[in-house]
Each structure stands twice: as C-alpha cells, then as structure tokens.
Amino acid sequence: MSKAETTDKDLDMRPYYDFSGGVRGKYVRRFAGSCKVVELEPDVAEVFPDAASVNETPRDVIAARAAKPEAR
C-alpha cells in the first residue's frame, strides 16, 4: 500500500496496542543533537543500502578535497 492509498482507518490505533508501560520522550535527548535523518531517493538507496556505504562516499570526497590544492 502506498502513502496515497493510506486511509484514516489504517492510521487508527488498534485496541490490542498496549503503551501503558511506555515512557514519553525516552530517547529524545540522545537523538536531539547527534542524529540527522536523511531520506534517500530509491535509486540512490539501491547503490547505498546501509549506513556504512552512505558515509563512505562523502568521506572520500572530503579526503580528495583536502588532498587537492585549492585552484584560484
């Protein structure tokens, strides 16, 4: 089911969900300053399937830029 096909009924809470032991905002501080979420387009996600592969390419670009003398 695509997002376009989602109905209000699909978004309703089910009666068997039990959040009585849940803690609101339990992990919010952990992620507030250190976590950046980036949504990859499907074609990019096929090439970079995990965090390690996503991070490798920008690091290579950073290293290449640092090694190359600045052209003026």
Image (spheres, helix red, strand yellow):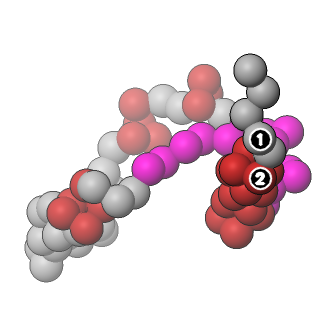
Q: Is residue 7 left or right of residue 39?
A: left
Is 47 part of what is drawn in magenta? yes
Quick one: which residue is furthest to the bottom in this view?
Answer: 21
Rendered image: mark on residue 10:
none
- Mark 2 and mark 1: span between their CA atoms? 6 Å
In this rendering, the answer to whether 71 lies above or below 55 is above
What's the amino acid at mark 2? Ala
Is 7 part of what is drawn in magenta? no
What residue is drawn where x is 28% and y is 55%?
Answer: 33
Q: Quadrant of residue 30?
A: bottom left
> In this rendering, does residue 16 appear at all?
yes
The answer to which of 57 and 9 lies nearer the viewer is 57
Residue at which label 1 appears = 69
Residue at which label 2 appears = 67
| Secondary structure under the numbered disc 2 in the rendered image | helix
What residue is drawn where x is 35% and y is 59%?
Answer: 34
In this rendering, the answer to whether 18 lies above or below 9 is below
> In this rendering, does residue 54 appear at all?
no
Numbered disc total: 2
What's the amino acid at mark 1? Pro
User: In this picture, which residue range is highlighted in magenta?
Assistant: 36-49
In this rendering, the answer to whether 55 lies above or below 5 is below
What residue is drawn where x is 85% and y is 39%?
Answer: 43
Where is the C terminus found, in terms of image quarters?
Answer: top right
What residue is drawn where x is 39% and y is 41%?
Answer: 11
Where is the N terminus found, in terms of image quarters?
Answer: top right
Residue 60 horizontal/vertical position (percent):
77, 56
Q: Is residue 11 left or right of residue 45?
A: left
